[in-house]
Image: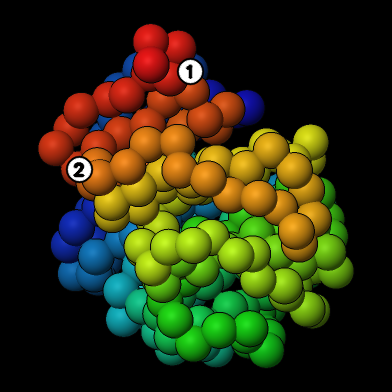
Amino acid sequence: ETGAAVAAGADGWTLVKSAGSDQWIPEFTGRNKTLNAVALDGKGRFWVVGRNGAAFRKNPGEAWQLIELPGPADYNAMYFDKAGLGYIAGDNGMIMRTRDFGDTWQVIPSPTNVDIHVITFVDSERGYLAGEDGLIMETTNAGDNWLRHYTGTQDTFFDGHFNSSGRAVVVGKNTALESWSNGHNSSWHECHDHRPFVTVAPGARYAALHNGEILDRSTG
């Protein structure tokens, strides 16, 4: 919304694009850590998280700041809403939650011990997580309790897109699953299989494969 953007990757490096600029500038976080996820909080600050408890926050125009978090783990996914609610998820089922834009974090009880690679919310109460062993789970009370969806696969999911109308797509190592209904009894089916997916774009029209290929659903 601001026009600013951040991309993150290996060895603690990020690419930062300022609002009103078309240039991406390399910026080092100060730690040689693999970075797995990027999020923008409701105060306009970017966050990146990654391996071995790596977590950094950046105010516009300032350098990356190292953030100490209470849940030591490999962090794989992060989410913020505009009101200050945020989540970080990672290996061994670790989940943390903040209600104050990331100023304080608490580890919350986890419904799983497998690695989580996706955590996202469609409103302040309803959210989803996905990860190893075909894991997809849903909460309707901001993460206090979670219910598991039956997916019929043991694939590892790396990304997913969910919306409030019940449309959802998740992608993983060997398959993509799609659902059209909300609630714990959502029915999931394969919409593409035997392809190594990496990510799916919001709206679920485009998906990227591990080999760099981009799939467009409008063309089949």
Q: Residue at x 24, y 42 (%)?
A: 195
In the drawing, does residue 148 fall left or right of residue 145?
left
Q: Residues within 10 Å of mark 1 (few under 14, many from 20)?
A: few
Q: Nearer the viewer, residue 217 or 25?
A: 217
Q: Residue at x 36, y 63 (%)?
A: 156
Q: Position of residue 24 (x, y in %)?
A: 29, 30
Secondary structure found at label 1? loop
In the drawing, does residue 91 fall left or right of residue 135?
left
Q: Residues within 10 Å of mark 2 (few under 14, many from 20)?
A: few
Secondary structure found at label 2? loop
- Which of discs 2 and 1 lies nearer the camera? The answer is 2
Q: Position of residue 190 (x, y in %)?
A: 45, 43
Q: Quadrant of the N terminus?
A: top right
Q: Which residue is mark 1?
A: 20
Q: Residue at x 49, y 87 (%)?
A: 113
Q: Tell me where residue 129 sits by quadrant.
A: bottom right
Q: Which residue is mark 2?
A: 210
- Residue 58 in view in this figure: no
Q: Quadrant of the C terminus?
A: top left
What's under tag 2, amino acid-wise?
His
Query: Are the residues tagged 2 and 1 within 8 Å (C-beta)?
Result: no
Q: CA distance from mark 2 to mark 1?
A: 31 Å
What's under tag 1, amino acid-wise?
Gly
Q: Nearer the viewer, residue 132 or 7?
A: 132
